[in-house]
Image: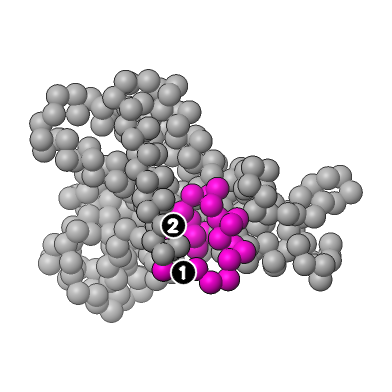
């Protein structure tokens, strides 16, 4: 760490987690296993971080967002110029890494082994932020479930339900740990009637809380009228929807001049003054809010 960071300007690991959106367990794993962070210590041995560490975490995340393995990041951080050949090699390794992670998850699911599934998922989740795990593992896994359902592969529905029960429990536990913390900006997240899978929105809710946003989460599909009713009960910084909006719903939202709406949707609708369409990239979506 740069010596200009005096103890007076330093802060604990919980604050670094809040500022970067990376949980404390992952930050400690990056330090202990890969030497990516080198915190100072107070007299009691507690970790202390500064502005340099925030920049270091941001640099690490920039590589991870490309799917690069955490074990490769330290090497890349010291390289000033990356050749095209090296870049192609890195990206090939990244694709292979996440395909391997997906294969290991699928093997555990196909064997209906909760202990094997938990071990594989916990290992991945301890090393990568939730938005990276979502983009590189969970969304491809959901697409694989969809492909198998369409192919009417025997056992595909049972496998999907086995995993969904597991991941709902896992994410629900994380959600409960985060939701009661004090946040200044409150967001309302809700699934529209057309949304059949609330997990993507739940993942985004957790991502938002880890970046300092408060969340009110409505998991089950709900009408636009009910969502607007909730919005009358308190002021929300943003209202984030998941599912396909009808033209009638768009007209209803357009009348709500005091609210800002955002929507994850497969149906492309031109952005309106108070309605912005989002894609599956949580980093981009968060920055748009």
Quadrant in the rendering for residue 162? top left
Q: Which mark is residue 90?
A: 2
> Would you name the residue on which mark 1 appears?
83
In terms of secondary structure, where does tag 1 sit? loop
Q: Is residue 234 visible?
A: no
- In this view, 274 is above or below 153: below
Quarter of the image where the C terminus is located:
bottom left
Q: Give the side of residue 214 with respect to residue 167, left or right.
A: right
- For residue 108, say whether it is visible: yes
Residue 171's mark? Answer: none
Q: Magenta region: which residues?
A: 61-84
Asked if disc 1 and disc 2 are in contact, CB closer than 8 Å, the reply is no
The percent position of residue 42, horizontal first and vertical second, equals 85, 51
Label 1: few (<14), some (14–19) or many (≥20) C-alpha neighbours in 10 Å = few
Q: Secondary structure at mark 2?
A: helix
Residue 120 point in image, percent of width and height: 45, 32
Q: Nearer the viewer, residue 72 or 85?
A: 85
Q: Residue furthest right?
A: 43
């Amino acid at each position: 760490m740069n010596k200009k960071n005096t103890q007076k300007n330093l802060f604990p690991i919980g604050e670094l987690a809040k500022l970067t959106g990376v949980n404390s367990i992952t930050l400690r794993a990056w330090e202990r296993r890969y030497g990516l962070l080198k915190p100072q210590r107070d007299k009691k041995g507690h970790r202390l971080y500064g502005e340099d560490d925030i920049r270091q975490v941001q640099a690490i995340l920039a590589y991870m967002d490309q799917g690069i393995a955490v074990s490769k990041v330290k090497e890349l951080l010291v390289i000033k110029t990356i050749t095209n050949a090296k870049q192609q090699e890195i990206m090939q390794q990244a694709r292979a890494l996440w395909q391997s992670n997906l294969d290991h998850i699928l093997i555990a699911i196909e064997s209906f082994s909760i202990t094997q599934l938990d071990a594989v998922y916990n290992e991945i989740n301890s090393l990568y932020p939730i938005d990276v795990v979502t983009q590189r593992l969970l969304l491809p896994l959901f697409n694989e479930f969809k492909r198998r359902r369409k192919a009417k592969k025997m056992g595909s529905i049972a496998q999907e339900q086995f995993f969904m029960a597991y991941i709902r429990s896992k994410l629900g536990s994380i959600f409960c740990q985060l939701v009661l913390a004090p946040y200044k900006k409150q967001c309302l997240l809700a699934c529209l009637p057309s949304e059949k899978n609330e997990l993507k929105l739940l993942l985004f809710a957790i991502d938002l809380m880890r970046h300092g946003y408060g969340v009110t989460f409505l998991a089950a599909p709900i009408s636009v009228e009910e969502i607007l009713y909730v919005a009358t009960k308190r002021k929300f910084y943003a209202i984030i929807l998941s599912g396909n909006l009808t033209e009638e719903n768009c007209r209803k939202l357009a009348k709500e001049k005091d609210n800002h709406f955002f929507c994850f949707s497969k149906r492309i609708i031109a952005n309106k003054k108070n309605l912005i369409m989002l894609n599956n990239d949580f980093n981009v979506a968060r920055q748009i809010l």
